[in-house]
Amino acid sequence: MWQQDKWGYPVTSAAPGAELWAWFQQEVDDVDQAWFGLTNALSGLFCASLNFIDSTSTATPHLSFRPQGLAEGLFSTKPSHLQYATLPRENVCTENLTPWKKLLPCSTRTGLAALFHAGQLYNTQYSSLGVHLRPVCRNDSCRDASLELRQVLSTVADPPATLNGKQDWSMKRYFSRSLSGPCPMAVTSRVYVDVTTNQTSSFTLKPEPTELKLTNYQGYNRKLAVYDLWSFPFHKEHGLNVDMKWKKEVSYKELFPPRLYVHRFVTGYGQEHGGIMSLLYNRHPYLEQQIIYMELLPWFTRMYLHTLKVETTEGNLVQPLLTRYTPGRDRQNPYLLEIVLTLPPDSTTRISFSFERAFLKWTEYPPDANHGFYISSAVLTTILRQADNFTVPPHMGSGLQSGLFHSSTEFPLRLHTETLLISLPTPDFSMPYNVICLTCTVIAIAFGSLHNLTTRRFQYTDLKKANSGGMRAWLAQLFGRGKHATSEDKLREPGKESEDPGEESETSEENDYIGEQRELVTPRVRAESDKKDR
């Protein structure tokens, strides 16, 4: 998240997560189908999850995101050809940087792109990647048009936080390498270092820059050290390593935020109703500021338009100049709110509204449902009349150089707020696991007992005799043979002699044992045996 109140305005504003917007030509009949093909193509090109963009995350703004570069009048009168979507959960990573670098003319072999090492770029306080494509004039006469592809990489590093409290920095320390030379295909290749605050020679810059340039934005002076890679004398062993060293320790001073910035947060409590409030700060002492505020909410945050309130912190109501509201539909399209209003000078304006949290189906929850659901950042669009803390390229400019050296009186600006994280009513996804574990345990215990009762045969056994027989008796008892089976036969036919001549006569103990088994025989068996004896 770009910290507007500390770092000023970004060169190219980027929303947290992934943001995609495109204007389609007037010849396109099916905009939705073209949008679907574009998102899938870009998803494969940049190894991003842009293919997850669908109708539930896509909207058509009417006031924000006007066409850039050369555009026909039909674009401004037919906003249905504009498609805008965000994925606030998507994070930039090495998988996105690798295909992004391959679009550069020299890739990462030489030039400024040689500094793009993923391990160093993502070890910073802020990083963003951007690709912008638009039609521009080919020459000053603007008789022919060309397509301009502009790639933007922004990083913010804090030397005191990463270098043990020291404010010194260098290219080699941040990027783990130095510049070996410009890209052979580049017309211009420059490195700019802002040295405006070095009025008292509080730091030294080495090596000496190629030139020093002064800029003046309506009374705001800026001093820049320029290293022209085409004219700089490179050393084969060392290359260009811009090194800045401070003479004193870090001394923190009061930060002066820019003239205009915005802050956004969630209000309310519980998991049924909630709200969103945005604070818009206009720090100019006497000038008003007209802005366009756009809010895009997912379908599961049902916005209540009648709760919309625009007022200053003193309680004075601010009447919007124009309000456009597109209601959302469950599982079909998001809610879109666009407001045009004028911020009073030296004031803080609050924009607040309420919403209701919807119930989701259990299949619509992400794997980390308890983490929460993200709401994409709001967008503030305006035109500044002063260039304080401003390095944004002009509307028809191309690159950072045009943003640093131009004499325009209007400065278009787009700011993104924070993304929000809300909680929805979430079922207990651990309950099925607990039920399965308990059920399996009970079944396992019950199955063992039932299996023993239904599959085993229980017999009366003389423990003394069974123990005295040893292993042989135990095996005989296990397989249903031996003396017990013989005594059973004698019990059924007591008058019949044994056919085995080698069988020994029963002892008195065996007779007693047979007598004991006679008591266990059913009356029917006893009657049959008596009949045979007669």
Image (spheres, rainbow, N blue to C red):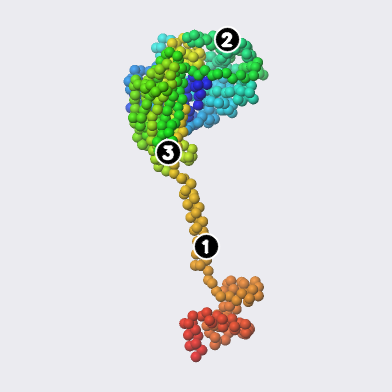
* Numbered circle sitting on residue 448: 1
- Mark 1: few, some, or many residues within 10 Å (few <14, many ≥20)? few
Nearest-to-viewer mark from 3 and 2: 3
Can see residue 103? no
| Nearer-N-terminus badge (3/2) | 2
* Count of numbered tags: 3
Q: Residue 415 at x, y = what percent?
A: 45, 22
Helix, strand or loop status at disc 3 = loop
* Numbered circle sitting on residue 337: none
Q: Residue 102 at x, y = what percent?
A: 52, 25
Residue under circle 3?
271
Q: Residue at x 59, y 73 (%)?
A: 477
Cα–Cα span, label 3 and label 2 = 58 Å
Helix, strand or loop status at disc 2 = strand
Cα–Cα span, label 3 and label 1 = 46 Å
- Mark 3: few, some, or many residues within 10 Å (few <14, many ≥20)? some
Q: Residue 482 at x, y = what percent?
A: 60, 77
Q: Are marks 1 and 2 in contact (CB under 8 Å)?
A: no
**Which amino acid type corresponds to the residue marked 3 in the rendered image?**
Gln
Residue under circle 2?
212
Q: Is residue 241 above or below residue 514?
A: above
Cα–Cα span, label 1 and label 2 = 89 Å
Helix, strand or loop status at disc 1 = helix
Q: Residue 207 at x, y = what percent?
A: 64, 14
Q: Are marks 3 and 1 in contact (CB under 8 Å)?
A: no
| Nearer-N-terminus badge (1/2) | 2
Q: Residue at x 46, y 17 (%)?
A: 283
Q: Residue at x 56, y 83 (%)?
A: 515
Q: Residue furthest right?
A: 237
**Which amino acid type corresponds to the residue marked 2 in the rendered image?**
Leu
Nearest to the observer: residue 389 or residue 333: 389
